[in-house]
Amino acid sequence: MVVLNRIYTRTGDTGTTALASGERRSKADLRVETYGTVDETNACLGLARLHTTGELDAMLGRMQNDLFDLGADLATPETGEPLSYEPLRIVAAQVERVEREIDALNAGLSPLRSFVLPGGSAAAAALHLARTVCRRAERLAVALAATPGETVSPVAIQYLNRLSDFLFVAARVANDGGAADVLWVPGKTRT
């Protein structure tokens, strides 16, 4: 369990931070940027939850917990060296749960005939913002995985991909089941 009895440590004053293993990295390091963007996604979910209730809110709460798991996963790179603890990793069951939740939400939506502009209700707008931040986290995770000497679990990348899909569907649900979606009209403002 994590114990935080002191918030500032001054250890980051020189622009570095510690990974879960204790290794120090620059705060501009791609791994730190990646799990920082996962944290940003989590904060966006917290904002969205100000406007959600019921089962959708419960789903978002579970995903916030998953995102802390994902941050821990990313903050503990696989090095091949033994650790004194079992590192927390995102697992396939978490991805599968998100897929089931997407399917449950999407079942009541009519098919789209155009792209959806971010907006509509406050909940939908916040969910679309979370989706775009999640997509950025996914892009960073993919870039990190492609970096020589770095490892990222494929399941972690899958989770981010599914989460962004979930957030799109959830935004439609929050827009009165898609009835209040704001649709893109190609070329509408060119005249």
Image (cartoon, rainbow, N blue to C red):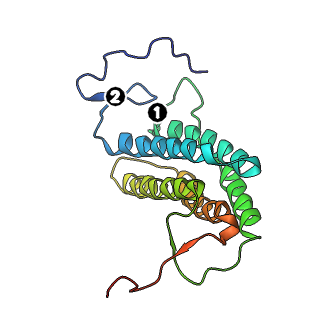
Question: Which residue is the site of mark 2?
Answer: 17
Give the residue displayed 45% in from the left and 43% down from the top. Answer: 40
The answer, for residue 78, to whether it is visible in the render is no
Location of residue 35 by image quarter = top left
Judging depth in this view, the residue of 125 and 166 nearest the camera is 125
Please, what is the three-letter code of the amino acid marked with disc 1?
Answer: Glu
Please state the horizontal and vertical placement of residue 59, each as a whole percent of the image.
70, 49
Q: Quadrant of the C terminus?
A: bottom left
Labelled disc at residue 10: none
Residue marked by disc 1 = 81
- The residue lying furthest to the left in this view is 14
Q: Amino acid at mark 2?
A: Thr
As drawn, 16 above or below 184: above
Element at badge 1?
loop
Q: Looking at the image, which residue is at 67% across and 80% down?
A: 111
Identify the residue at image location x=39%, y=53%. Answer: 140
Q: Give percent across and percent down for residue 71.
A: 50, 39
Who is closer to the viewer here, 106 or 82?
106
Q: x, y percentage for residue 129?
A: 48, 55
Measure the C-alpha gap from mark 1 to mark 2: 20 Å
In the depicted structure, whether residue 17 falls above or below residue 191: above
